[in-house]
Image (cartoon, grey):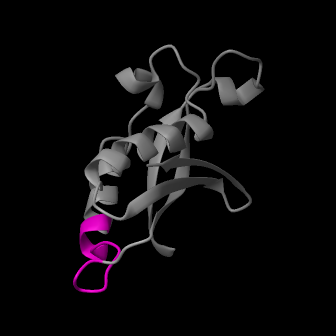
Amino acid sequence: MFSLGVWREFTCQHALTGGDWGAENLPHAHHYRVELRLEGDQLDQHGFLADITAVEAALAAALGRYQDRLLNDLPEFAGLNPSTERLAQVLAETLQDRLARPGLRALTVTVWESPSAWAAARLER
């Protein structure tokens, strides 16, 4: 099995819903670090699991939708608590479609909310 990973940072806002989390229930921003990891059992004719430049571009494009936005206002979070776990899931689903290729078996998105706290979503093919 082979793995390839890239990461980017971005900032967006959310307000947690469905519980009493004090100040977290009010809109607030996080400077997130998002790590994308691809796993597969086949390399292409060039010896790559995927083109790193294309993977970086796909991640940057996906994050561009959320940069400086309030997650609660976006349709993919309608009626849902925009938690770090949910953000990881939404990004994983978006990137799985954009990065589909032969030999790719799994994709993991890890969203770091702070230097010591993260959530991840892993999708398998």
Q: Is residue 57 above or below residue 20?
A: below
x and y percentages locating residue 92 in the rendered image? 44, 46
x and y percentages locating residue 91 in the rendered image? 43, 44
113 inside magenta stretch = no
| Res 112 quadrant in image | bottom right
x and y percentages locating residue 66 in the rendered image? 37, 41
Q: Nearer the viewer, residue 104 or 85?
A: 104
Q: Main secondary structure of the magenta part?
A: loop
47 inside magenta stretch = yes
Region rendered in magenta: 44-55
Q: Nearer the viewer, residue 7 or 12?
A: 7
Residue shown at 68% from the left, 62% from the top: 115
Residue shown at 71% from the left, 28% from the top: 23
Q: Would residue 74 be visible to someone looking at this image?
A: no
Q: In the displayed structure, does residue 75 sit left or right of residue 61? A: right
- Residue at the limit of the structure toward the bottom, as seen here: 46
x and y percentages locating residue 110 in the rendered image? 57, 55
Residue shown at 32% from the left, 48% from the top: 62
Q: In the displayed structure, does residue 80 sit left or right of residue 101? A: right
Q: Nearer the viewer, residue 12 or 62?
A: 62
Residue shown at 74% from the left, 17% from the top: 19
Q: Would residue 100 be visible to someone looking at this image?
A: yes
The number of numbered discs placed on residues in the rendered structure image is 0
